[in-house]
Amino acid sequence: MSIITNESTMEDHIKKLEIEKNSQILDFGCGEGKYSILFAKLLGNKGKLFALDESESKLEELRKKIIQNGLEKRIHIIHTDGELKIPLKNVIIDYALLYNVACCIHGKENQDDLVRIVRDVFRITKDSGKLIINVLGKTMEKRIDAAVPLIQDYFILKEKESKKFFLDNNRARYRFFYYFLKKSENKV
């Protein structure tokens, strides 16, 4: 049996997205930029990745990685105060990434927060834009599955993909990808 790593799972996922060099990407809740760096490397000089997070210490780590990888022209860091409002202009984003953050903002007690974020992502996303949610583990999968009806007020679920991989102790984990397409403005 071949061992599938988390890294190979992410590489396959990124290839599937077929990111164009001049794309505009939002990495909402980017943390230290693990995914920001991967995606920014795919962009050309006209592409831009907006890395948004509320943790100044994590964004400082991302700044170091940006310099190490020579990505200063491709990544724009946005520090927020934790408010669920994205400080970007309307209709500029091709891909909005909610990677390992959507699970933290969805539960019975904070469905309103999820709807506010998705509505704001809708505002900044181009008509042909995509929302991709990525979560790890079956518990998080259940939370996102429960949120899909709320999300589909703004984005249409096109595909849900499950990828099994193994951690260092050979325990199988699952990574779930949800691929949404923006709904037409006049349908909302």
Image (spheres, rainbow, N blue to C red):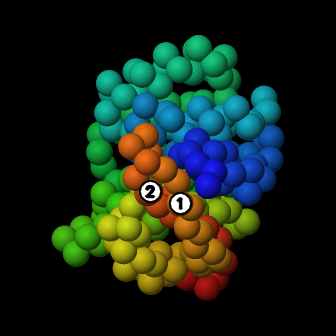
Residue 66: percent from left, percent from top: 57, 21
Give the side of residue 162 with respect to residue 18, left or right. left
Label 1 close to label 2 by CB (< 8 Å)? yes
Residue beneath the point at 59% across and 69% down: 161
Give the side of residue 100 with respect to residue 8, left or right. left
Q: Which element carries disc 1, helix, strand or loop?
A: strand
| Quadrant placement of the C terminus | bottom right
First of labels 1, 2 by sequence position = 1
Vertical relation: 40 (above or below) 147: above
Vertical relation: 142 (above or below) 174: below
Is residue 115 shown to the viewer in this render?
Answer: no
Residue beneath the point at 54% across and 46% down: 6
Is residue 104 shown to the viewer in this render?
Answer: yes
Q: Nearer the viewer, residue 94 or 188?
A: 94
Residue 82: percent from left, percent from top: 29, 45
Indicate the amino acid at tag 1. Lys
Residue 98: percent from left, percent from top: 48, 55
What number is the disc on residue 60?
none
Residue beneath the point at 49% across and 16% down: 64
Q: Residues within 10 Å of mark 1 (few under 14, many from 20)?
A: some
Q: Which residue is mark 1?
A: 164
What number is the disc on residue 172?
2
Give the side of residue 158 with respect to residue 55, left or right. right
Vertical relation: 12 (above or below) 48: below
Residue beneath the point at 74% across and 36% down: 43
Quadrant of the image occupied by residue 102: bottom left
* Residue closest to the far front: 1
